[in-house]
Structures are given as structure tokens and as C-alpha cells.
Amino acid sequence: MKKILVITNNDSVWLKPAWVNVINSVHNQFEFNLITLPEKKIKNMNPAIYYFRTFGLKNFLTLAIFSTLRQIKFYKTNKIAFSKYRSMNLNFFDEDMIEKKILTFKPDIIFITCSYIIPEKLLQINKDILWFNKHASLLPEGKGVFPYIYNTINGLHQGISFHYVSESIDSGDLVYFEKISPKRSMVDFYKEIYDNFDKYFMKFYKNTEKLWQLGSIFEVLFTFKKGFNMKTAKSVLEAANQVVPKIEVNEAIQKHAQGNSVFIDVRDGIDIAETGTIEGALKIPRGFIEFAADPETPFHNTALEKNSEIILVCAAGGMAALTGHTLVEMGYTKVLNVGGFSDWKDANGPVES
């Protein structure tokens, strides 16, 4: 029986009831242990204050009443069930205590549903332990807090993603994701995710098992091929630059004015939010380009046609080259790399925030 250590916010509205549902559904398949943590401050503010400033008084009061009723329901029905599996309730992110728990419990999987970035020290305690996170968005879009709002404002699909944990926010490799049909409100969206979290969890786990099985096969193949034609980051980038021509910034600005080219910024949404982007550019992160560029997927961006001239931009040019290489391999015939966004901005190219 595999051991799962859950590190979660001490949230009686969504997360604790969700984990009770998971444990009740699969307790005969896994041994669970849970650590709860207080919700982390958002932008150095108490979460309640942040919610008030984000949603306004009316929505804040509605959310507060709803949350109170959910908490009452949890304490009436699931508090004892949750307490049975919780071994540690911390008042802050106590790295030493968490490390001790990992060393004593010896989990196969650590699953986090908390608002803290996991330090490298914990991630490296035992490299055989698999760390996973759940995020209420179709990554790589909508990283960070309140992805529902970000996705709604930007007209993006809603969904749920499961990914490996890394030291960056919501940036580990994807393991499983699922699109969720549009909901009337953020509360309805979260009810869909957390009231059905046991079902999403099992879909994630079954998909992960398939990846592990494939991984064992690939490990054998990798060992066999080790030393033969192994690629490096440098060689991959050089190959991409040979396939994807670079275009001078001034020439790209002229093409932008003509309006016949499709511009794509392949940086993550957080980076774009900080610096802005090329005016009218599509925002498609490198890790999502295959889905956006393939007409057979539900995430296809209809602005992408294989005979269109596509001009890519990123932070320094490398990601644009690699993304362009992928597009060429997918059949796109006119792909160019304009390099880094700072060069475009310095040349007074049109931008938007």
C-alpha cells in the first residue's frame, strides 16, 4: 500500500472536506497522513483583507456567508474523520518539523494543496519521493492565486491541473489536466473541483501510474542509448536556430504595422503581466504551444494557420527559437524569431500591458 503525505492549508471550506472525500474513497488503496498549515498572506496582506479588496463588499459578504455555512457543515460531518488522519497542525511553515515527518512517515508521494513554495531542501530529502500539486487552472496559464479571475478576464478555458512540484510557482511538469465547462461564478467553479476532488484525484493517479509504467521502459532505453547521440541544451538550441530564422526588430515592427503577421509571446503569463507585451500579440506559453497549434485539440487557437507568417518573441530569444522549432515540426512554414521583448520595447515597437 502506497503512503501519501498531504500538506494542505487548514481550510475547512474547500480543502479539508475535499481530502476527506478522497480518503473515504480510496482509504483501502493508500495510507494517508496529513499536515495542515495556516493560509499564507497574499501580497503581504491577511487573506480576508485581500479578498475584500479583490471582490468588493457585496461579493466579499456573500463569500463570507457561504464560507461560514461550509465550515459549519464540515465540523458537523467530517471533523472527526479528518482528525483521524491529521498528524500535525502547524502554526507556520516549520521546515524542520515537516522534514521530521517526511523522514518518519517515509511517504511514496507528497501531495501539496497549500499556498507555500516548497524549499529545495525538502524536495531533495529523498529523490524517490514524488511531489505533486493541484492547481485550479489549465497550466501553464493562470499560475498563482485566483486563476479563475485571470482566466475569465483573458477569455481562457477553465480547468484543473496536476503537476510535479518545483521551486517555482505552479511550474512543474504536467501529469494530468482536464478542461471544466464554464461556470456561473468562482464559487460554482470551486464547488465543481472540490466537491468532486476524489474523482479528479483518481484520474490523476491512474494517469500517473501509466506514466510510471512508460517511465520504466524509457529508463531502460535511456540506459541503453546513454553515450550515443545524447543532446545537450546547447545542441538543441543550435538546431532550433538553424530552422527558425531571426528577424531584425525594425523589420518586425514594419510587419506589425502591415498587419499580415501573427505575433506570439511565448513567455509565462506572470512575466507578461510584469512587463507587457507586443500590441495584439497572442499569449501562448511555450509549454502550451502544441495544444494551441493543433486543430485536433479543444485548445486550438484559430488564429494559428499553417501558412500564416508567425513571429515569436520571448525574454531573450531562446524560448522563441525552441517554440518555433516545434511549430516547424508541426507543419508551420513561415516561422520567425524576433528575440527578446526588451529589444522590441527599446526600438519603440507598439506594446500593451
Image (tube, rainbow, N blue to C red):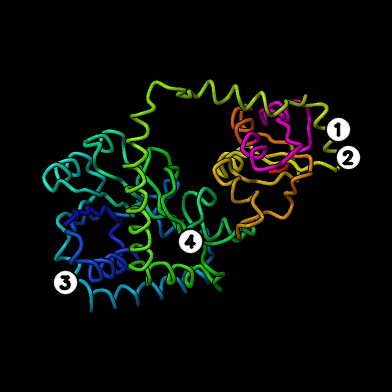
| Secondary structure of residue under mark 3 | helix
- Residue underneath mark 4: 178
Of the 4 image quadrants, the one containing the C terminus is top right
Q: What amino acid type is highlighted by mark number 2?
A: Gln
Q: What amino acid type is highlighted by mark number 3?
A: Ile
Q: Are marks 4 and 2 in contact (CB under 8 Å)?
A: no
**Horizontal arrangement in the rendering, residue 262 relative to residue 6 (left or right):** right
The residue depicted at 44 percent of the width and 67 percent of the height is 190
**Residue density around tag 2, few if under 14, some if 14–19, many if 20 or more, within 10 Å:** few
Q: What stretch is highlighted in magenta?
A: 324-350
- Residue underneath mark 3: 80
Count the labels in the image: 4
Q: Residues under labels 2 and 1: Cα distance? A: 6 Å
Q: Residues under labels 1 and 4: Cα distance? A: 40 Å
**Residue density around tag 3, few if under 14, some if 14–19, many if 20 or more, within 10 Å:** few
Which quadrant of the structure image shows residue 195?
A: bottom left
Residue 4 location in percent, x, y?
A: 22, 54
| Secondary structure of residue under mark 1 | helix
Mark 1 vs mark 3: in front: 1
Mark 2 vs mark 3: in front: 2
